Image (cartoon, rainbow, N blue to C red):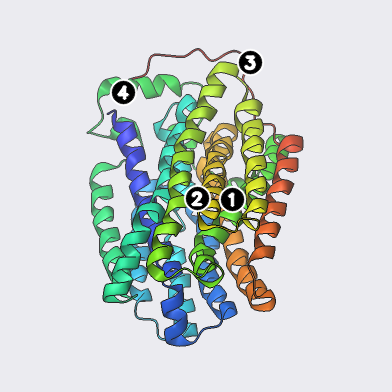
Amino acid sequence: MKFRWFIASFITVVFFIQFIDRVIISLATEAIMNEFGFSPGQFGIILSAFFWGLVPAGVFAGIAADRWGSKKVFAVGAAWWSIFTAATAGAFGLVSFVIARVLFGIGEGPALSNAIRIVTNWFSPKEYSTALGLANSGVYIAPALATPVIVWTIANFGWRFPFYVMGVVGLIWVLCWLKWFTDKPETNRYMTEEEKQWIKKEQGNISKSSDSGKKMSFKELLTIPREVRGTILANLWAIFCFGFVFYFLLTWLPGYLMLERGLNLQSMGVVASIPWLGAALGSLVGGRLSDYLYQKTNSRRISRAFLTAGWFTLLAVCLILVNQMTSIIGLVSVLTFACFVLSCGHAPITTVIAETVPERAGSIGGLTQLSQTLPGIFAPMITGFLVEITGSFQITFAFSAGMIISSIVVIIIFLHPPEISRRVKASTTA
């Protein structure tokens, strides 16, 4: 395996760890609510609190990545969130849970924006979507594979135990990251010279601040260039809508299965993991198909915008159908396909940032992370209070479908990634 793909896999691993950390509290919904007497609305605030720290931290982490490099920023963030993952187990009431989750969220700020920065530095433009799809697959593999294990540990050792374990695992990742990663592939002693030269050749027509050595001001890093503003803003809205559906499912799917569908803890652990297997597969398929279409059509409009709109159309249909399912088999089938098409559409729209403003992939990537994680503040709270008011999850699935439909309209009308003037010839892969 070429070393750049090892790096992409390493990012997959950290996303895997991060999202296990995030999902533990959702899987412990019933145990924590019963122990502390939280209402659905109060627990929705706890689920939301993580994003109060994540959202602003994500923007500044992206800027920091462009100025000081992803190695330092990612290492500090991973160490921070690992410490506060473990600290969550020490919470003893609503306020302490909220504080622990806010601080935990701050540590996870560097994730997406730094991943975009790393892919822009380490890969050929023809590989962007595939590399980001691979990295993002860790987001979905985590709840898919870890859910049954975490549920088992909660049942046998209590809800606090998995928080302690994952805190240690995160610190181990930091040590490996510091050993193997460098901000620039040309300075990495583990990569072959042949691969370094191939990457340099593939990126020859891309101007990146990391290559030129220019340090941009914070004002420049926060400004979206006028000529691509419409595309960037449309892309940010599409990612916002993706984030709303994703975090609605990630935070409340276990609670939905237990509170609305009547599953016990063990059954929920199995059922809740299956849709995320579909999402993990979709992340790989969506990224690879997007790059394949780009190489065949030389059109980012087709391979990024229109392809995503197609995936999101299928997603909207699935979200509407969830409320019609009366059997668990039918429900799981619809949710699994919904998660599959949701993640299929994610890699192409994330790629738009790297292709549109490669010299600011970190800082604009920070805005991407802001758009993706900001709905994480609202989705858990809105869901919790709607369930408390109506006694049902039905309206939340309908609302999520409406969000996705709005993103489809915006993508089709406004998302115009920059095209190149000549067909990109497929080159020999290093």
Task: Give x and y (percent) for residue 412.
Answer: 73, 35
Residue named by callout 2:
62
Q: Which tag, 1 or 4, sits closer to the chain's start?
A: 4
Residue named by callout 1:
367
Task: Give the spatial CA distance, label 2 vs label 3.
Answer: 30 Å
Task: Give the spatial CA distance, label 1 vs label 3.
Answer: 28 Å
Q: Which residue is at a point 33% across and 54% down the rendered structure image?
A: 75
Residue named by callout 4:
195
343 and 89: which one is in front? 343
Label 3 CA crowd tier, 10 Å (few <14, some 14–19, many 20+): few
Q: Which residue is at a point 63% across and 22% down the rendered structure image?
A: 299
Label 2 CA crowd tier, 10 Å (few <14, some 14–19, many 20+): many
Q: Quadrant of the C terminus?
A: top left
Task: Give the spatial CA distance, label 1 vs label 4.
Answer: 31 Å
Query: What is the three-letter code of the residue carrying label 3?
Result: Ser
Q: Describe residue 149's horizontal placement relative to residue 403 as left or right.
A: left
Residue named by callout 3:
421
Whether the residues at callouts 1 and 2 have beta carbons within 8 Å, the answer is yes
265 and 379: which one is in front? 265
